[in-house]
Amino acid sequence: MVLPLITSQPMRTIAVLGGGIGGLATSYYLCKNPQVTKVIVLESSSRFGGWLWSTRRSDGAVFEHGPRGIRPAGAVGRNTLNMVEDLGLEGEILPVTYSHIASKNRYLYVNGQLHKMPSKISELLRTVPPFSRPLLLSVASELLVAKSKEEDESIHSFVSRRLGKELADIAVDSLCRGVFAGDCRKLSVRSCFPPFYNAEQRRGSLILGMLLGSGPTPVISPGSLAQRSIKENWAQWSLRRGVESLPESLTEYLQQSGKVELHREATVKQIHPSASGWKIHLEDGVVSADHIISALPAKALSSVLPSSCQPLIQQLQDVSSVTVAVINLEYEGSILPVTGFGHLVPSSEDRGLLGVVYDSVPFPQHNRPDGQTTRLTVMMGGAWFQEVFGPPEAVTEERLIARATEAVQSHLGVTTSPVWSRVALQRDCIPQYYLGHFSKVASMRGFIRENNLPLSLTGSSYDGVSVNDVIFSGRTAVQELLGTGV
């Protein structure tokens, strides 16, 4: 089969596969480019926004079933805030500063007890449970550790080597469960924490990398909202009506642009090369496009590509994802024995339970306005879902709620029952970047380039799983395709 060539002519029609935050952000950046005449967004489900999903109850309470707080830091954080400002959402922002108790107090649940993580220099100088020695000793000795010559390494191996096994077993294990719902013994440090890997490679030390910088970063000029976040020292932010307001505003922006066709319940069945680009086969018709930008999960894209793309199909199938059960609970009154952002649980303590977020502490604005309540979110499963709960399609909501409320009772000493609960079983929601992920992604993009395929890859399967990373990945895909600034 002859594959179509990319031409230097203006892109008339670009199809974006997937209407999650990645697909919507990509379409937003395409809209801003004068070379693009038409954008067709194809989303298989009945709603846009993907994992950015909020429940807004009629009494004013808001519950998140996916990401909740978004970080403003770095180029990717500034980029998202610039978009938020452009969409007119500044007035909706709920900022949480670094001085807020939710930023200062984060806990680990180890040996049946909650332990506050050190947040001040003085706490690094003394032994703070659950650690057996002052953390400053680990940090100081890190400067003397030799640089690795390996191309990649697991996060657990990297941290054990540089900072000691105890920190890797407890703190980093918990962190990887909180961020990736994954196993730090399998996840790649180079792909999951590029600044760590780059710091060692360029400076020979994590500490020196943090102090001196670990290499070039994208240059994003901060707009007035991003400047405000720096001035006010924000640690994270949400939106008054929940983070789903962001994809909702993007959808509205795209509808009003006059360039974009948005299609819900439009499952892509197969894509085939055509003389001018691609024919995209849906259940009820065919769409033609000059170029495709896929924001689908890697496995979903692999199932629709033509057989002529075999090496690419195999590599896409190798990117696996994990399932997370998100259980929102609401309790009457103030029930927390501690205040903070929440607590994480290392795999050695409880393999099935990843952590508990104390939602009412960072975002009390999302509580129902009348009477005092406490909102919590319990995260379960991830890389351990199948082992602990069995197949996702077989687990009952009752079992997940019982497991979540039991954890709240044993970890936080809460004796009352929740007055409201909601289960969201997020299947295959977080891609896992295992060892060698960076070379796999480079190889995928190399195949696309060598075969002149009018195809771009974006979204959480490739360049970072955070909301900021996914949005920035969309921006990058558009810049690389059209060769102009956004």
Image (cartoon, rainbow, N blue to C red):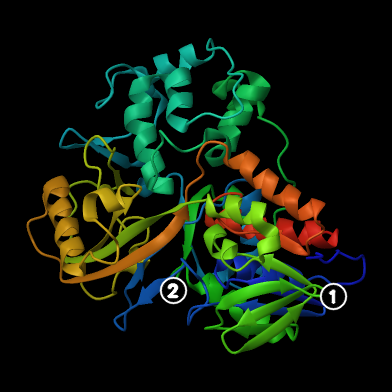
Q: Secondary structure at mark 2?
A: loop
In the picture provided, is 176 more to the left or to the right than 190? Answer: left
Q: Is residue 123 visible?
A: no
The CA span between labels 1 and 2 is 46 Å
Closer to the chain start, of discs 1 and 2, is 2
Instruction: Please name the amino acid that badge 1 sits on.
Output: Ala
Compared to 170, does 75 lie above or below? below
Compared to 435, does 394 lie above or below? below
Q: Considering depth in this image, is 340 or 56 the residue closer to the camera?
A: 56
Q: Which residue has dot 1 on it? A: 275
Q: Secondary structure at mark 1?
A: loop
The image's mark for residue 241 is 2
Q: Position of residue 295 (x, y in %)?
A: 61, 64
Q: Is residue 50 visible?
A: yes
Q: Position of residue 394 (x, y in %)?
A: 24, 66
Q: Report the residue at 43% width, 70% height from top.
A: 53
Q: Residue placed farthest to the front in the image?
A: 1
In the picture provided, is 111 more to the left or to the right than 159? Answer: left
Q: Position of residue 389 (x, y in %)?
A: 23, 55
Q: Residue placed farthest to the bottom in the image?
A: 284
